[in-house]
DNA sequence: TATATTTACTGAACGGTGTTCGGTAATTGA
DNA sequence: TCAATTACCGAACACCGTTCAGTAAATATA
């Protein structure tokens, strides 16, 4: 089993071709245009043959999404870690939004599939799940550097993980609203940077103080 | 044309029944279970008859989404305006997240349709478009009160509108990530309130100052 | 090399979808 | 009462994801 047999490699190549054409169709014609018959056409197979390589359409989409998250991780890593962590955090967020806007249908698909993902361990905490996600870890490590550099305080019940999650929520909201409700409007990255700087300023020094008159639940 | 004719009222009632059953199906069985034949069954008509009242399925979904945004607006208005604006802004955000989590499929549909909405005036600015949206205006007016009370500064190129948009982006990100990637995880509203307070703190007094080493574009 | 066995692939079909269209029944206005 | 409009439906079209029996090809066995 050390060396892959020809059959196994052919198998892998066809699986790859299926995913590749799926991603291309999504990118060029939108996710609505993607069908098993369309993929089969593109790789010169019959529709039924696709099912020799993937259990169903969802399995294909899942694998395409996994690739998408890998690409997203690469994009997030683009800004160097060794620079000013305040800038790194902000530019990492900018990269997130840029990726979303550059691959709108793909990005929307990634996050509409995310809920259907098979849960390997349902009892696993949200925190440990996210800490195994490379894309989230890029944000997390930048936040870590921000805290280490003293630009940001952590509280007992609101630590690096919570701040990183909040950063993800902020940039995800910017990206999603731009994709869904402002698809035609031009994107002003100067404004986005100002927003991200303001977000960051909120976590400087006084993270966990609550405003008065809190209402619970 | 002052008084509606019986035919017109019957027409309106059937249109309403179509939307009502559509919303019910989405709420009880998810958006994937919704079909023209399913709606026709529910209101005791043939599938073809539906097309006497709506041009196609998208027109039905659009009207259902409009209703959803109205319900969202009502939910956002739940917290009183006359209270401390800092708390009002935060609790308005909490209401946004609560609505999303209470109507997951409906909420996701609303924002997946939003991009397909017919644009009455394509040249209209994003700002004036949003200022006509009642749901956004609830957030906007709370931010207005926050600024008026002196808790928050405005800059020439980053005013009330931008702050309100940023607030929407923040709560939308929280809601969407909770719905898509953390659907099984329990939601901690205490943490969400801390996040929203931190967001708000970022806009206190020093909104538009940029961090060093800015990279443009 | 010849044969048995596993693998790869396909055509046709099933039940579902949104949508259209010709025809019929019901309602309306004159 | 009768013509004209409206409401409604059955049947069909073209697509979808998926299954399955059956055939062709590749592999393993002798």
Image (tube, coloured by chain):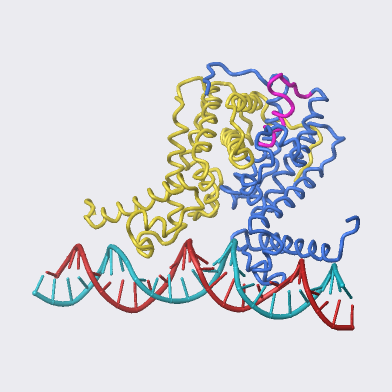
Chain colours: A blue, B yellow, C red, D cyan
Residue A87 percent across, percent down from the top left:
79, 34
Residue A208 percent across, percent down from the top left:
66, 20
Q: Examine the image and state in which quarter residue A170 appears.
A: top right
- Check if residue A99 falls in the magenta segment: no
Residue positioned 51% across, 29% down in the render: B92
Q: Is residue B140 visible?
A: no
- Check if residue A166 falls in the magenta segment: yes
Residue positioned 65% across, 52% down in the render: A104
Q: Quick one: A134 or C4, which is closer to the camera?
A: C4
Q: Name above or below for residue C18 compared with residue B67.
A: below
Q: Quick one: B186 or B96, which is closer to the camera?
A: B186
Q: For the image shown, how many numbered marks are present on the structure?
A: 0
Residue positioned 55% across, 50% down in the render: B112
Q: Name above or below for residue B77 compared with residue B67.
A: above
Q: Point out the image quarter for the N terminus of chain B.
A: bottom left
Q: Examine the image and state in which quarter residue A64 appears.
A: bottom right
Residue A39 percent across, percent down from the top left:
67, 66
Q: Is residue A32 visible?
A: yes
| Left or right: B9, with B211 as reference point | left
Q: Quick one: A55 or A26, which is closer to the camera?
A: A55
Residue A128 percent across, percent down from the top left:
73, 33
Q: Name above or below for residue B186 compared with residue A56.
A: above
| Outermost top residue | A212
Residue positioned 64% across, 63% down in the render: A29
Q: The magenta stretch spans which residues?
A: A151-169
């Amino acid at each position: 089993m050390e060396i892959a047999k020809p059959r196994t490699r052919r198998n892998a190549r066809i699986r790859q071709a299926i995913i590749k054409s799926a991603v291309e169709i999504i990118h060029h014609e939108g996710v609505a245009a993607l069908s098993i018959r369309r993929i089969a056409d593109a790789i010169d197979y019959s529709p039924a043959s696709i099912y020799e390589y993937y259990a169903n359409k969802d399995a294909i989409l899942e694998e395409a999404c996994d690739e998408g998250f890998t690409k997203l991780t690469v994009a997030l890593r683009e800004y160097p870690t060794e620079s000013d962590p305040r800038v790194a955090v902000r530019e990492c967020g900018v990269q997130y939004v840029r990726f979303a806007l550059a691959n709108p249908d793909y990005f929307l698909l990634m996050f509409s599939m995310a809920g259907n993902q098979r849960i390997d361990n349902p009892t696993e905490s949200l925190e440990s799940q996210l800490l195994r996600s490379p894309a989230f870890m890029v944000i997390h490590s930048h936040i870590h550097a921000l805290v280490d550099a003293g630009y940001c305080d952590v509280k007992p019940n609101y630590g690096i993980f919570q701040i990183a999650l909040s950063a993800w929520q902020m940039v995800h909201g910017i990206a999603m609203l731009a994709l869904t409700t402002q698809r035609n409007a031009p994107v002003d990255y100067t404004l986005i940077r100002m927003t991200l700087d303001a977000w960051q300023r909120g976590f400087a020094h006084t993270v966990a103080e609550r405003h008065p008159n809190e209402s619970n639940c």
